[in-house]
Image (cartoon, coloured by chain):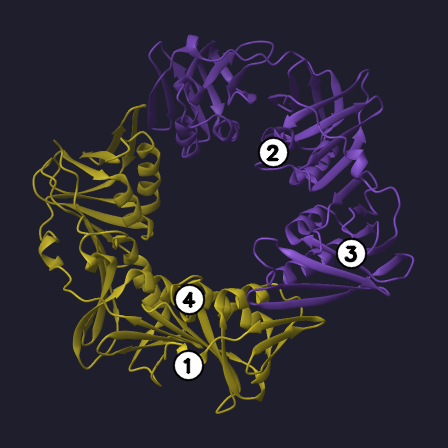
Chain colours: A purple, B yellow
């Protein structure tokens, strides 16, 4: 292979690959990416790599003088290209090495064994079309609620639900839940679970315009511009989350998302480290927040718009859960409390400006 | 004590204190800062704390209603104040607690035992006056050369030398050396060693204008604006570094600092991890750089202005040492090689625009 490619576009694709492809592995071929110079229909350099959970393919427009392919360590190539000063990079591969030249700088990388490289298949075209901005917004709104470490593996995933004329993404760690709906037309109705870590990478490539999705037996493939990402699906069933969403509001409030987020952050400094507990008391259009720990006690008061019956309602939350839920919301948020005051029934958070988005938090038990 | 203080100024002083005062210690009173409301000559809130290596005192203009003092955990108070939304904060202390109020938010912190707090003495006025910008520039130019971990403790320090009409700061880890001179009039001629970690904190408060220095038996005190920092001096003797600075240049070059830094960074990606070795060959006005490791080989070529006898000179450096030495230099740098080609004699780096600054690197042995 031999080709010339703009440094910036190559660096962007490599930086994406470097995030996904592991830098160390007991299987050294997993640390490599495959470069392929393609001559038609368009002259492009294709990069592909995987961490076995997520496969990546990126295309960069290039001036291809000779087609061909080779595999080289992803991290090293990324480091080399990110330091290139020239606008253009020339790549040429022999059976033994890949030579990268830019101005007077030259780098020769030993090429790996192409036959040992995991074969990657991305399909040709996307099955479903989706607004990339809507998908990005939806995933951003829910990914915080997925578990980082959890005994139930599905809690580390985000469920994609196809409902015919709409779709939903939903995440939960058992203590909180978030979902958001978006427009997507699909023939089949299906639910699949994608690892939250792969969704993080989806978010890096979702810009505006249209994106494509393909749902197959064991994978969900995202087509976003010149990038294709294929995520392995997770096994197991997502819990029946509709059960935990309270149907009826006993008392509620409307409060600005930023105001609530900042107040929780202020008060939570004094919260007991383990529980991160913040107490909320809603009464007569005033929300009082308080937290107490080894160092002392913090309180704050917010004027809110009261909803429902005007009686005092007391509830306690993990401050981090409260902060993360409202952080992805903008403007007025309707907070709906259920059950009896002090009984720790789930609370619902609905941003007024985004009715497709909903979050639920299970409060802390007030002993 | 009772006072009102602008949030921003208090937050800046607390963030400085939080960097110095440890967040955990077997002696809990070390994690605290002392707050003192002073009524005259000016109304200020004084904050003081220490890590036993560096003492800090900062003053913030305040509206003092009642003088007094208390000690509270530095980290917690910093976290509380950094999240305050209001412009002004009111502090009032009783025997048991410090109450901080800002708008409707209130925080009560249990106060510590003032009698257990390490007594801190900062003296009244500075003995020597120095241009703060010059001192900052000088320390920035040399601190990279101090050792992070080293068997000789003095290598983790920066030597301040008072020579009567001028002063010098110098750092070395035994493999490289940097010094910079600056104007300072002192009656005595002295050399003292300040821990590099304390110098890092000096750098955070050195703005433009004048700064003060006081040299006492076991400490060097910096007065910078409303901040006073007193650094414990290190025991031991700094090595006689003048010995290692070559007197005579055999061959040399003039090269742009950024150009050399970037070229080294490019080539070094391929260098062997442990040695980080980059080979330099200077011949006929061309500097060739090369590095080689497990993944392959990188080369680069720079046109330079040749100095001295025109013959080929070969030398190898640790890439990090080379990068760090030229990173703090701007514009043209004169590099002077000594000894025979390939004999690993120390190299001298002199920025043309800053004749007060000099760096020396001991090359790697070329086996």
Q: Which residue is mark 2?
A: A200
Disc 4 to disc 3, how far (Cα)? 40 Å
Check the picture and name the quadrant holding the C terminus of chain B.
top left
Q: Which residue is mark 3?
A: A342
> Marks 4 and 3: same chain?
no
Find numbered disc 4 in the image and state the secondary structure of the residue it sits on.
loop
Disc 3 to disc 2, how far (Cα)? 36 Å
- When asked about the image quadrant of residue A234, the answer is top right
Disc 4 to disc 2, how far (Cα)? 37 Å
Along the viewing direction, whichever of A20 and A341 lies nearer the viewer: A341
Q: Residue at x 65, y 74 (%)?
A: B101
**Dot 3: within a 10 Å radius of its alpha carbon, few (fewer than 14), some, or many (20 or more) residues?**
some
Badge 1 sits on which subunit?
B
Find numbered disc 3 in the image and state the secondary structure of the residue it sits on.
loop
Q: Residue at x 26, y 36 (%)?
A: B276
Q: Which residue is mark 1?
A: B115
Image spot of residue B148 (x, y percent)? 28, 52
Image spot of residue B233 (x, y percent)? 24, 69
Q: Earlier in the sequence, mark 4 or mark 1?
A: 4
Find numbered disc 2 in the image and state the secondary structure of the residue it sits on.
helix
> Marks 4 and 2: same chain?
no
């Amino acid at each position: 292979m031999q080709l010339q490619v703009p440094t910036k576009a190559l660096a962007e694709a490599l930086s994406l690959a470097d995030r996904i492809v592991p830098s160390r592995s007991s299987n050294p071929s997993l640390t490599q990416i495959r470069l392929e110079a393609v001559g038609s229909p368009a002259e492009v350099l294709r990069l592909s790599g995987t961490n076995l959970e997520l496969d990546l393919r990126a295309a960069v427009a290039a001036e291809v003088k000779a087609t061909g392919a080779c595999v080289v360590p992803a991290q090293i190539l990324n480091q080399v290209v990110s330091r290139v000063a020239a606008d253009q990079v020339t790549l040429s591969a022999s059976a033994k090495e890949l030579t990268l030249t830019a101005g007077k700088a030259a780098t020769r990388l030993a090429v790996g064994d192409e036959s040992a490289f995991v074969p990657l298949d991305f399909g040709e075209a996307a099955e479903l079309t989706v607004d990339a901005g809507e998908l990005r917004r939806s995933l951003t709104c829910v990914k915080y609620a997925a578990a980082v470490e959890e005994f139930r593996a599905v809690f580390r995933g985000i469920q994609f639900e196809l409902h015919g004329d709409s779709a939903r993404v939903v995440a939960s760690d058992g203590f909180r839940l978030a979902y958001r709906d978006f427009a997507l037309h699909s023939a089949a109705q299906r639910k699949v679970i994608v690892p939250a870590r792969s969704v993080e990478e989806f978010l890096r490539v979702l810009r505006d315009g249209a994106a494509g999705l393909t749902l197959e037996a064991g994978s969900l493939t995202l087509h976003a511009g010149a990038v294709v990402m294929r995520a392995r699906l997770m096994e197991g069933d997502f819990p029946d989350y509709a059960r935990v969403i309270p149907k009826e509001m006993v008392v509620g409030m409307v409060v600005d998302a930023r105001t609530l987020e900042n107040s929780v952050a202020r008060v939570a400094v004094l919260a007991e480290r383990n529980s991160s507990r913040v107490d909320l008391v809603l009464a007569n259009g005033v929300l009082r927040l308080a937290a107490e720990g080894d160092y002392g006690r913090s309180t704050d008061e917010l004027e809110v718009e009261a909803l429902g019956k005007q009686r005092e309602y007391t509830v306690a939350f993990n401050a981090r859960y409260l902060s993360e839920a409202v952080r992805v919301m903008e403007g007025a948020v309707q907070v709906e409390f259920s059950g009896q005051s002090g009984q720790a029934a789930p609370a619902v958070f609905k941003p007024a400006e985004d009715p497709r988005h909903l979050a639920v938090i299970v409060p802390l038990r007030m002993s």
